[in-house]
Image (cartoon, rainbow, N blue to C red):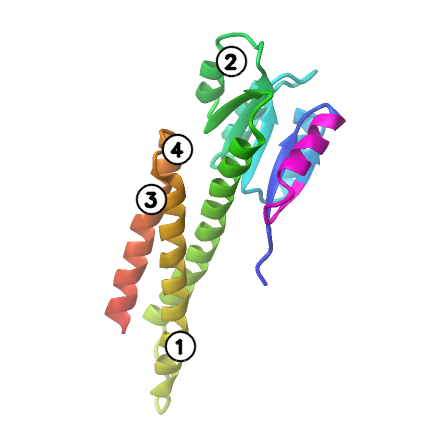
Amino acid sequence: MPERAKILLVDDREENLIALEAILSSLDLIPVRARSGEEALKALLSTEFALILLDVRMPGMDGFETAAHIKRRERTRNIPIIFLTVVDSAPDYAFRSYAAGAVDYLAKPFDPWVLRAKVAVFVELYNMNRRLAEQAAMLRERLTAELPPGEPTDQAAVLPELSRRLTAVEEELGRVTELALGSTDPSLTGAVSDLAKRVNHLRAGFDALS
């Protein structure tokens, strides 16, 4: 069974972390807590995350500074960040959030359903990318491997399983595309478009192999 995706929850207030975990409890993911920007950066050194929910207002290193460190690191720069802050924040907070590399910005109190839906889409994209990478690696092995003499059935045994997995990825892409329909978020629509190109490329490679 594949490992569940992890998302990083960053907030200096315990009650906010508890609330976020409750909102996301119905999703198939593992929430990881961080009580400060420094703690978040430390967690990112050893753990792979599908998404970061980042509070803007924190003592010491605030959300903007934390995001800047995340985006400077090669290993973490592509992790999507959703900023969370109170509704009476400075009017330029939304602009600063997107300038810092966030894919979205939500003001508290936010609609739990909206947050859950956004998280679900990004986690699904993350899971699809992982599965697509696995299928691409398997296909590359089949394209480059030379079958030993006397074993003509080896490729025939592998191709049906590869075809089944690739079809499953294509079906998942269809579901994610439906979820992203109507979105005005260029980061989300761009990610879906890029994923579709990669799936089509993988399908073309498989068709050439078979």
Q: Is residue 104 left or right of residue 108?
A: left
Spatial CA span between label 2 and label 3: 29 Å
Q: Which residue is mark 2?
A: 93
* Front-most of residues 91 and 51: 91
What residue do we see at 51% from left, 44% from top?
123
Q: Which residue is mark 1?
A: 158
Q: Is residue 145 visible?
A: yes
Q: Is residue 195 above or below residue 97?
A: below
Q: Is residue 162 above or below residue 68?
A: below
Secondary structure type for disc 2: helix
Residue type at numbered disc 2: Tyr
Placement of the N terminus among the 4 image quadrants: bottom right
Q: Is residue 152 left or right of residue 129?
A: left
Q: Nearer the viewer, mark 2 or mark 1?
A: 2
Residues marked 4 and 2 touching at CB (< 8 Å): no
**Lower sequence index among marks 1 and 3:** 1
Spatial CA span between label 1 and label 3: 27 Å
Badge 1: residue crowd in 10 Å (few <14, some 14–19, many ≥20) = few
Q: Picture quarter containing residue 137?
A: bottom left
Image position, residue 157 (x, y; %): 39, 81
Assess whether residue 23 is covered by the magenta stretch.
yes
Q: Nearer the viewer, mark 1 or mark 4?
A: 4
Placement of the C terminus among the 4 image quadrants: bottom left
Secondary structure type for disc 3: helix
Secondary structure type for disc 4: helix
Q: Which residue is mark 3?
A: 194
Spatial CA span between label 4 and label 2: 19 Å
Q: Is residue 160 left or right of residue 111?
A: left
Read off the magenta span: 14-31
Badge 3: residue crowd in 10 Å (few <14, some 14–19, many ≥20) = few
Residue type at numbered disc 4: Ser
Q: Which residue is mark 4?
A: 187
